[in-house]
């Protein structure tokens, strides 16, 4: 089967096509992928397939695109609260 592996940094994007066997899991595909050859110290905590978060034991299907997500730098809710507070102070 042909799948894709995607990973993005602020200044660099990585996308590669991989060939995996039937029954291969997300975790198995990532371990064998070119992604870990390029980024050997990458800590994979969160992954998805076409923007839907999945576990590493999910079995892949033909054409799936594994997306490796980076951790959030800031909590979006906390950032919004801070922005609202700053807006109130400026008024």
Image (cartoon, helix red, strand yellow):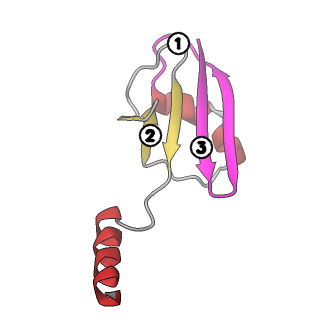
Residue at which label 3 appears: 7
Q: Position of residue 76 (x, y in %)?
A: 35, 63
Above or below for 7 versus 78: above
Q: Where is residue 58 in the image (x, y as percent from the top left)?
A: 38, 25
Residue at 28%, 73% in the rendered image: 81
Residue at 70%, 51% in the rendered image: 12
Residue at 50%, 53% in the rendered image: 70
Q: Position of residue 30 (x, y in %)?
A: 55, 34
Task: Tell me the element at label 2.
Answer: strand
Q: Main secondary structure of the magenta part?
A: strand
Q: Residues within 10 Å of mark 3 (few under 14, many from 20)?
A: some
Identify the mark nearer the N-term, 3 or 2. Answer: 3
Task: Tell me the element at label 3.
Answer: strand
- Residue 47, disc: 2
- Residue 62, disc: 1
* Residue 23 visible in the snapshot: yes
Q: What stretch is highlighted in magenta?
A: 1-25
Q: Going by the image, does 40 lie left or right of 85?
A: right
């Amino acid at each position: 089967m042909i799948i894709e592996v995607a990973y993005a940094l602020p200044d660099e994007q990585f996308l590669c096509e991989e060939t995996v066997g039937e029954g291969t899991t997300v975790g198995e595909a990532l371990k064998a992928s070119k992604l870990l050859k390029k980024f050997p110290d990458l800590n994979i905590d969160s992954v998805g397939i076409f923007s839907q978060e999945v576990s590493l034991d999910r079995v892949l299907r033909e054409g799936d695109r594994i997306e490796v997500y980076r951790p959030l730098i800031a909590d979006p809710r906390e950032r919004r609260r801070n922005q609202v507070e700053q807006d109130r102070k400026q008024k």
